[in-house]
Image (spheres, grey):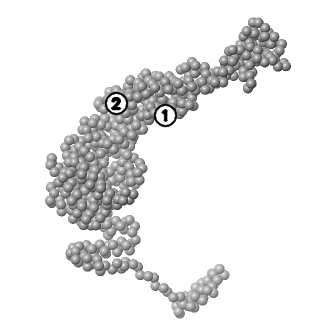
Amino acid sequence: ALSGGREGSLLAAIDRTITAGGARLLERRLSSPSCDLGEIASRQEAVRLLVEDRALADRLADRLRKVPDMDRALSRLALDRGGPRDLAAIRNGLAEAEALAALLADSTSSRLARAAGALRGHGALIGLLEAALIAEPPLLARDGGFVAAGQDAELDEARKLRDEGRSVIAGMQADYAAETGIASLKIKHNNVLGYFIETTATHAERMLAPPLNARFIHRQTTASQVRFTTVELGGLETKILNAGNRALEIEKRIFERLRQAVLAAAGPIGEAARALAEIDLSGALALLAIEADWALPVVDASRAFRVEGGRHPVVERALRRQGTPFIANDCALSDGAEGAAIWLVTGPNMAGKSTFLRQNALIAILAQAGGYVPARAAHVGLVSQVFSRVGAADDLARGRSTFMVEMVETAAILNQADDRALVILDEIGRGTATWDGLSIAWATLEHLHGVNRCRALFATHYHEMTGLAAKLPGLRNATVAVREWQGEVIFLHEVREGAADRSYGVQVARLAGLPPVVVDRARVLLEALEKGDREGGGHRRAMVEDLPLFAARPAPPVAVETPDGVRRALEEIEPDALTPREALEALYRLKALLTAG
């Protein structure tokens, strides 16, 4: 997309992936299509199988919707920036992977069968994580509470003391009361003594005497109460006060143990994540092919490039939202083993030249990414590189004008493109003087044909170049058709053999909203310049010198003097004070004065 965002991009138009890993894999495939015919065929086989078996594709999609982002979780754990939810993501992802492997057990696609193999064999790690973690753990390890009950006796005790300290103390109080025979014995707490046993002075005598005095340690005597402690109560007090921190420390140790177990299996987990992304992408490309009526292309080692009924997926999507059909077009750059195959595409602005160029480049990319393509049929001989020089941009911060950027990009293409490259060039040389630009475009086209010997689509407004088709055996003229009706230009968006005779730039300027006076003036100048061009350069120069440059300026408005009698009568009228009848009479008087004046 021109804005740099996702909306309006190829990725947004074709992304049917379900998982985050599948979306990333699609982006990598589009940015780096394969040049390995075996790899491309393997990808196509997987997609074709899911196109033909829609029920299997739907079952896989249902499972994939439950798959978390294992790649990201594994990365965070490896960098020691992960948390319990990342462990849960690994657990849930591997569990879904096992279920997906069962669905693909009988797959005839070698690629999907390999993916299924990578999804198996994680039972031990899944069991460990399922037993150790609760169903929905918190985000951060420092929050605690993510280890399941029954995993660690010390943790369970610490949690019990932390959460049930009061009931534990009550139970101990009942035990001490039964042991001493003092029903009124209490265990209390204050900030000075902490937990202590309290009884009356009368009952204290029994506790101060053998054998109870060996167990109950005197701590304090008040006017009416005596306070004791025991070794068990002192230890319990420490445990209760520290139970929260102790439980958290134990959970952190368990988290680290689980993290290390995951990292020890990082290789197989990564393979499983990649397999899940592969399955997701194959299903997404199959769904796209079914929904958008795309075709499975033939990709081989030839130099063919033939497309029947090709379409631009992004433009087609935008037009569909408007209820407008996309006009499909054929493209045939195929030639023999020798020479180039170049189409010189002419036609007016807004007719669809740029769309035609881009859609064929996208078809090549999609074919070698391993999916179906937006066409009725396509045959793509392996493309080594796709080069594109389209649009206008400058780089003023580096002191490069729009034309300089254009030339730098064109130079890169001419210096790098080999005979298996696919090149699309749009409007080379338009940023400079007419004859300079035409010369550069002409020489560029000759170089692509004779030196690079590549397949190319070359769009231009320099109609003089169409004559090259008679001299260069690998060059063919094509044009985007239009019709004129009652002074209006109608774009048919059909690419046909032949050359355009004009550019219809003035009509497009009118469609863009230029003021009518500017459009009319431009039409007059165009006719004069074209006549001058036909009659020779000298006549044209004389004609330019004689152009009435300001003829199009509208005449200044003529000032109309108001008669004095009318002015005075108007000044005397008070509109708010007039009745309807008086207003009508005043209007008649003014008209009479104006006529008399």
Give the SS element for disc 1. Answer: loop
Q: Which residue is mark 1?
A: 81
Disc 2 element: helix
Q: Is residue 308 visible?
A: no
Q: Nearer the viewer, mark 2 or mark 1?
A: 1
Which residue corresponds to mark 2? 115
The residue drawn where x is 47% and y is 22% is 128
Q: Measuring 16% from the left and 51% from the top, which residue is drawn there?
A: 339
Nearest to the observer: residue 539 or residue 233: 233
Residue 118: where, in percent of width, then height?
36, 28
Q: Quadrant of residue 509?
A: bottom left
Tag 1: amino acid: Arg
x, y (%) of residue 583? 61, 83
Considering depth in this image, is 244 or 274 the residue closer to the camera?
Answer: 244
From what the image shows, is residue 345 above or below residue 233?
below
How much space separates mark 2 and mark 1, taking CA atoms? 29 Å
Residue 7 disc label? none
